[in-house]
Image: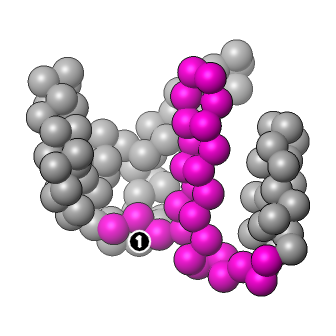
Amino acid sequence: MENYYNLLNAIEELGIDVSKHREDIAVPRKSFFRYEFEEFKIDFLPVIKGLKNFMTSFNGKEIVSLYEVDIPIISYIDLLKTKETDSRDKDIDDIEHLKRKQ
């Protein structure tokens, strides 16, 4: 639960009201957060379908620097795996776009 509250604290530092998440009895392994900003949206997922385990994916992460801050993101290969697992119309479209840009 400590990691869950650390996540809430970090989201709150972005200026987002997380009071509803603090009041609810949350199940950290099932809690999903999506926040939309003007130029982007951010999702916090407890589990990602199609990936072996967290450490394998974390070790394969890519790093993006933004304003001199290193941000770990899911690797291109792992992103494709997650999209292929769901196979919704949106995921299939995403896969086509990702492969064209590669």
Q: Amino acid at mark 1?
A: Asn
Image-based side of 91 in relation to 54, left or right: left
Most distant residue in the top direction = 67
| Residue that appears at 81% across and 37% down | 14
Residue indicated by mark 1: 53
Location of the C terminus (image quadrant): top left
23 within the magenta span: no
Residue 75, image x, y percentages: 36, 43
Residue 81 location, x and y as percent?
23, 55
- Residue 35 vs 28, above or below: the answer is above
- Tell me the element at label 1: loop
Indicate the quadrant where residue 51 lies. Answer: bottom left
Q: In this image, 61 relative to 20: left or right?
A: left
Q: Is residue 3 visible?
A: no
Q: Identify which residue, 46 or 66, lies in the foreground.
A: 46
Image-based side of 60 in relation to 25, left or right: left
Question: Is residue 33 shown in magenta?
Answer: yes
Magenta span of residues: 24-49
Q: Is residue 27 above or below residue 91?
A: below
Q: Quadrant where the N terminus lies?
A: bottom right
Determine the residue positioned at 23% across, 62% down: 86
- Give the residue at x 41% y 58%: 57
Residue 41 % position (x, y)? 55, 36
Q: Is residue 1 above or below residue 11?
A: below
Residue 66, image quadrant: top right
The scheme the figure's colours follow is one colour
- Out of 18 and 64, give the one closest to the viewer: 18
